[in-house]
Image (cartoon, rainbow, N blue to C red):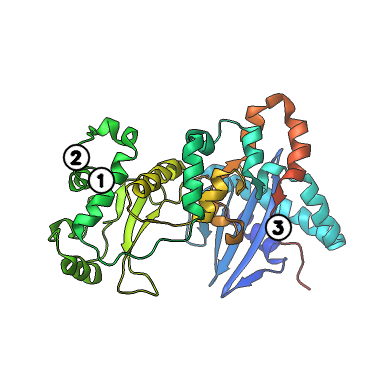
Amino acid sequence: MNDRSFNRLIEGIEEFKPVWKGRDKQWAFFLKEKRRWIRLHVTEYDGTYYFSGSDFDSFSCPGQSDIGPDLDGRLSVWAREIALWKQAVAHDPIEAQALLFKKIPLRCRRGVIQRRNVRLLIPQWMPIASELSRNETKEILEILRKAPPEPLRSMTLKRFFEYCREAYQANPATFRKLGYRSSLSGKEYYRRYADGRDEGLLELDPESSKAFERWYRCRPQGGHPWEIYRGGNSTHIDMYVSKPALRPEGWEVHLRASSSTRLVETCRIALALTKAGLPVHMDDAESYINRILDQDWVGIVPQEEGIGYAWQSFPQEWGVQDCVHLDWFYEESPKAKAWLNKRLRMAAHWLPEEISAFLKS
């Protein structure tokens, strides 16, 4: 690493007042590299500086000697840009911020936009409502809007597998490539298609409510006994059994799937269970309603960030579950970029950006 460029960069950063978070000092900048904007976050803790941001791998100094020749050469560019930013904010920090936010491309910003607007601009994106029939939509909305069902008086492994049988038969297409058969028992489906780490659930006496309760209270931790549709950390479907907070003598069966890619399957499971007379609680029912009706908020994330877990970076009160990149709108209508820019700047709600814009006294 070029020590001279690094020292000059640190000196420039330290000219700005940091934001304190515990013992960490933090700074944030938008910098121009030729015709490209980048976002730079810097955290200092106990003498070590940690760098993260768009289009480069995170690194720390001192302690990391090799960051690659390309990034090493960019340190002097960052130092020069921070020096220019210092001149601007020294003259008038409010005006400097206003001009910066006018210049920054929307694709570098983070915001939210209503799902119905996304669907108008990108009709084929996340077709939740169109994948459910009109009758399915009507029935699942009725289920989601109902008060939660009364707790079950008892629970056995046999009863749980009754739920499983309906859950797997609700989506045969999901398992068609895995040798799906319509005549299996709930236990056989569970053995084939659940996560497999059942924490000893399959070994219980299927008829014994005492055995189930004993296992529930004392089961080993670390498995995934409720993961009936396999997937990643946020792309699986759970059907879990729990004790009601106010009725500890009863039982509840819950469906939980946060990813919109599993929403249609989860809705069909709920429909099948309801028709079979098996009461179920739908976790995040309000979010399901909003997504089905295209009335929730979708996150817009900077182009260099991944989409998969980007929803976690939005305030919880926005209820964001899905995210898009701004370029997806342009790809759908490449000849209308100026038109889109003008309207998206107003139709989307852009989140505040924390930038370092005040110099030390």
Residue at 19%, 40% (x, y): give it: 184
Instruction: Say which of marks 3 and 2 sits in front.
Output: 2
**Disc 2: which residue:** 184
Please indicate, yes or no, whether residue 67 appears anywhere in the rendered image: no
Cα distance between the residues tagged 3 and 2: 53 Å
Where residue 264 appears, as percent x and y from the top left, is 44, 41
Residue at 51%, 62% (x, y): give it: 62
Q: Nearer the viewer, residue 123 or 301?
A: 123
Element under label 1?
A: helix
Where residue 129 appears, as percent x and y from the top left, is 53, 38
**Disc 3: which residue:** 352
Relative vertical location of residue 335 with respect to residue 22 in this rendering, above or below: above
Relative vertical location of residue 69 with respect to residue 120 in this rendering, above or below: below
Q: Earlier in the sequence, mark 3 or mark 2?
A: 2
Residue 176 relative to residue 286: left or right: left
Tag 1: amino acid:
Arg
Element under label 2?
A: loop
Tag 2: amino acid:
Leu
Element under label 3?
A: loop
Relative vertical location of residue 328 with respect to residue 98 in this rendering, above or below: above
**Disc 1: which residue:** 165
Residue neighbourhood size for the residue with mark 1, other residues' Cα within 10 Å, grouped as few (<14), some (14–19), many (≥20)? many
Residue 15 relative to residue 325: left or right: right
Residue at 56%, 42% (x, y): give it: 70
Dots 1, 2 in contact, CB < 8 A: yes
Instruction: Say which of marks 1 and 3 sits in front.
Output: 1
Give the quadrant of the C terminus: bottom right
Cα distance between the residues tagged 1 and 3: 48 Å
Residue 324 relative to residue 206: left or right: right
Residue neighbourhood size for the residue with mark 2, other residues' Cα within 10 Å, grouped as few (<14), some (14–19), many (≥20)? few
Q: Earlier in the sequence, mark 1 or mark 3?
A: 1
